[in-house]
Image (cartoon, rainbow, N blue to C red):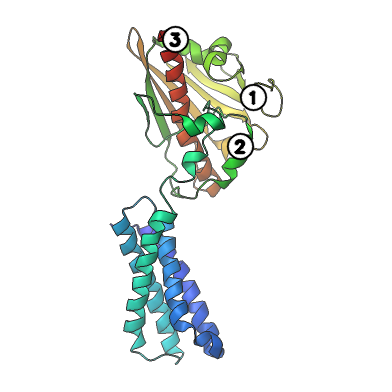
Amino acid sequence: MLNTRALLLASMLGTVLQVAMVVAGHSNKSIAGLFAVGGMGFSLIAGLAYAMWARGDSTSSLAVGGLAAGALCALIGIFVSYMLGDVPVSLLALGTISSAVTGAIGGWLGKFLFPASGVVAMLVVLAGAPSEADAQTVKPVAGASSTVVGEPTMMRGTPSLAMMAILSESVNAQDISPIVSEAIIEASVDVVWEAWATSDGLRSWLAPHAEIDLRIGGRMRTNYSAQGSLGDPQTIENTILSLEPRRMLSIQVSRAPDGLPFANAIQHMWTVLYFEPLGPDRTRVRVVGLGFRSDAESQRMRAFFDRGNAMTLQQLQRHFSARQR
């Protein structure tokens, strides 16, 4: 099935380029001499654009979408040129077919140029996630999952924050749904709650510098740099919005670390953590990030926290696994 939004955007882009070329070529013979090559080239761009906006689809689907976008923009461009008296009517069919082929090639190439999770996967540093070096080597831990969600509250205050500025635009620009991550922790709910809700607990697994004032309106402060200290520019401060001991904790970033490129978007998001006992020594932890918007900054932030929350929970799993050895 074609991605309607991607097809519309790619076709519009290709059409603008095609029409601009034929209008300019109407009064410039040099440009008119490039109609054939330029038309196919712009259809190739339309195909690539389709793949970029529909990334994650199958190779065949991207090729078909690129074909449709390339053909549509070429047909409109050639029709405008025909109405201006610059090309014969026979070119409507021939030019559209050839441009459809290059559009399909563009869609096919886009599968390799715009992978579904390319850049995002290497830009994870958020909510309690491992350091930049750790993020490159961390392996999935059994029981951890990330279902389209991520947590907005704790972000590692390391130089890796600069990398977030180049987050991939692979995210659907209209996806404002919550991001959710969950994992099974091999420890009782009382012990897991203590790891999240006490200063000593946070320092034992999340950050070398951490403190929490567990009350509504209280603060949770963390600093992930061993050389840093609470209160310095890389300190992350969260405000506790609500809590139910051993069951739920909700927090919102009230002070972001210096260099965070989501300074505006993060003001609108918050995180809810759920703790579900599964037995005397097993707990399901679920992290839900909410408050995302459709603007580009919020969408980049959403992708960043989506991956990072899963890694945070993996880190918590490793902490309790190590304690059992």
Residue 262 shown left or right of residue 245 in the figure: right
Q: Label 1's element?
A: loop
Which of the two discs, 2 and 3, labels the residue nearer the N terminus? Answer: 2
Mark 2: amino acid: Leu
Judging by the rendered image, the residue that carries numbered circle 3 is 323
Q: Is residue 177 above or below residue 187?
A: below
Mark 3: amino acid: Arg
- The CA distance from mark 2 to mark 3 is 30 Å
In which quadrant is the C terminus drawn?
top left
Which of the two discs, 1 and 3, labels the residue nearer the N terminus? Answer: 1
Mark 2 Cα-neighbour bin, 10 Å: few <14, some 14–19, many ≥20 = many
Picture coordinates of residue 279, whole percent (x, y): 31, 10
Judging by the rendered image, the residue that carries numbered circle 1 is 225
Q: Are marks 1 and 2 in contact (CB under 8 Å)?
A: no
Tell me what residue is drawn at x 55 percent, y 27 percent: 154
Judging by the rendered image, the residue that carries numbered circle 2 is 161
Picture coordinates of residue 125, whole percent (x, y): 54, 33
Tell me what residue is drawn at x 55 percent, y 87 percent: 30
Which of the two discs, 1 and 2, labels the residue nearer the N terminus? Answer: 2
Mark 1: amino acid: Ser
Mark 3 Cα-neighbour bin, 10 Å: few <14, some 14–19, many ≥20 = few
Picture coordinates of residue 134, whole percent (x, y): 52, 29
